[in-house]
Image (tube, grey):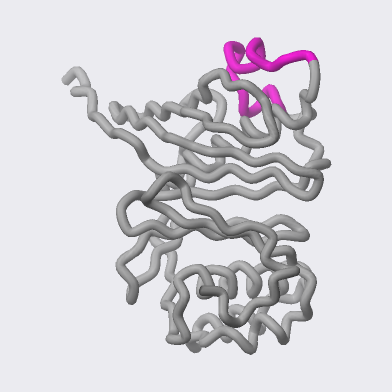
Amino acid sequence: MFKLVEAMALVLKENLLNYAEYAVWKIEEEPEFYRAGLILSDWETNYLNNITHPKRKLTWLASRFLLKQLIDTDVFVELLFDEHGKPYVTNFDIFVSLSHSNEHAAAIVSKSFEVGIDVEEPHRKIEIIKNKFLSTVELNNIGETQVQQQLLIYWSAKEVMYKIYGKRKLEFKDDMYVKPFLLNERGDINGILMKNGLVAEYHMHYLLNNDFTLVVGAEKEVSVINQPS
């Protein structure tokens, strides 16, 4: 696996329990490097040519390049998006999720479960919006030290749940809850999503270091509550 990549750019490749594989790539190369490793459809080529911002073009290419390496294939990977913007691959029987920051691309694949991934820069200004994505209970669970790191994990965990759920009109503050967790360099988190009678539980794993914060997760259990008529 990862026959085309240099080890210095691949900063992480791990398994989430036994049902998913994910990776993080540090974006250091020029766009031509990633483009050379991809087979793009006509619409993807047109879309890429219409991206005018250099950084956005680079992260777009890098995330798709990493996905192809994670699948471990030399053939065309048809990555499409549904009506809610959720990515899916048509010619491989897998679930996928992508993420990128300014400096890193991340991808996760699974043959068994819906999955999600989110990578963030460690110095993202997250505290100024904490009241918009955390409930009162979650805010009270924030410890007095390493607040920035805690907030990033909460944010990324809800991003992962949102990606797995895959539908719009989901409120980070009201519809998703992240259970309390102990902050370490890495650890496990559990979250609950409740929306329109759907109750979904998510198992997630986080990783903190000086370069990025990463959360990956999979759908653990889903139940439907009968709504009153």
- 211 is within the stretch colored magenta: no
Q: Nearer the viewer, residue 33 or 169?
A: 33
The location of residue 198, given as percent across then percent down, is 30, 30
Q: Residue at x 37, y 51 (%)?
A: 19
Q: Which of the 4 quarters of the picture holds residue 31?
A: bottom right
Question: In this picture, is 72 found above or below 188?
Answer: below
The location of residue 183, given as percent across then percent down, is 67, 25
Q: Residue at x 69, y 76 (%)?
A: 6
Asked if residue 167 shows in the view, the reply is no
Q: Quadrant of the C terminus?
A: top left
Q: Residue at x 30, y 67 (%)?
A: 93
The location of residue 135, given as percent across then percent down, is 58, 18
Question: In this picture, is 165 found above or below 144?
Answer: below
Asked if residue 24 shows in the view, the reply is yes
Magenta region: 130-144
Q: Nearer the viewer, residue 204 or 120?
A: 204
Q: Which of the 4 quarters of the picture holds residue 187?
A: top right
- 139 is within the stretch colored magenta: yes
